Amino acid sequence: MTHPALLFDLDGTLLDTDSIHRDVFADMLRPTGLEVTEEVYLSKIHGRLNAEIFADLMPDAGDPQRLSEDKEAEFRKRLPRPYPAMQGAERLVREAQVAGWYMAVVTNAPRLNAEAMLDAIGLRDAFDLIIVGEECLRGKPHPDPYLEAMRELGVKPAMCAAFEDSPSGMRAAAASGAFTVGIRSSLSDADLRTAGAQATYADFNDITLASVRAHLRETNA
């Protein structure tokens, strides 16, 4: 029998790095006159691919991909090590690891960032694979990264639970057919459910492997 799978977004889900990203974007966008407030960050930046963000907000600043690479290099420079995981995340991940569940990170972050963040929270060893949006045909909000994770793990969507914190990520997870769980690190229950969440939690403290299994059973009943 195939084991179920847990599929995790990274930024804002397994660890809360939004403040670091926001500060880097604020510094880079300052010459445009755009102030990166919380509202601007959530509406124009959060959950999107970097190249799209720079093409949209800095259309005259040069190659969006180069700007993306500069931005992420600065993020890695500012990321403290070690860094705390989201509350309850390590317990759930280790519980799933012991139970033999498959686990993957599914992120729009560049691969170097994903590796750096997982190392910073001490959980790199727990994951079978890392799926990066920019390495797929389409990143989130399209379901391609989640579908690729399912394909590589050999697990059907009905046996997967996906954890997300952004509207674009939640839409991608919902479109993949996974059971969708929203982490309220920056958005409300209503916002996440509007984007496709079937359940939401403030963090991972109230989520157990047993509760995830029960949700999967209910969904497939």
Image (cartoon, helix red, strand yellow):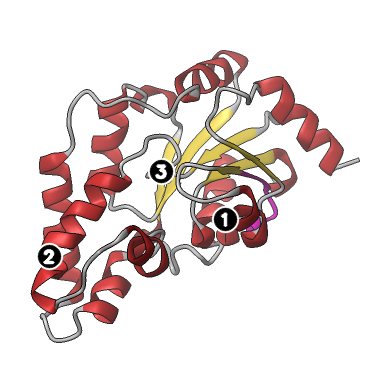
Judging by the rendered image, the residue that carries numbered circle 1 is 170
Judging by the rendered image, the residue that carries numbered circle 2 is 28
The residue sitting at the right extreme is: 221
Q: Quadrant of the C terminus?
A: top right
Q: Secondary structure at mark 1?
A: helix
In the displayed structure image, the side of residue 161 where residue 36 appears, left or right: left
Judging by the rendered image, the residue that carries numbered circle 3 is 12
Q: Position of residue 24 (x, y in %)?
A: 16, 55
Badge 1 amino acid: Met
In the displayed structure image, the side of residue 112 where residue 63 appears, left or right: left
Callout 3 crowding tier (Cα within 10 Å): few <14, some 14–19, many ≥20: many
Magenta stretch bounds? 174-181
Which of pointers 3 and 1 lies earlier in the amino acid sequence? 3
Seen from the viewer's position, the closer of residues 71 and 184 is: 184
Callout 1 crowding tier (Cα within 10 Å): few <14, some 14–19, many ≥20: many
Residue 1 in view in this figure? no
- Kindly indicate whether the residue at mark 3 contacts the one at mark 2 (C-beta within 8 angstroms): no
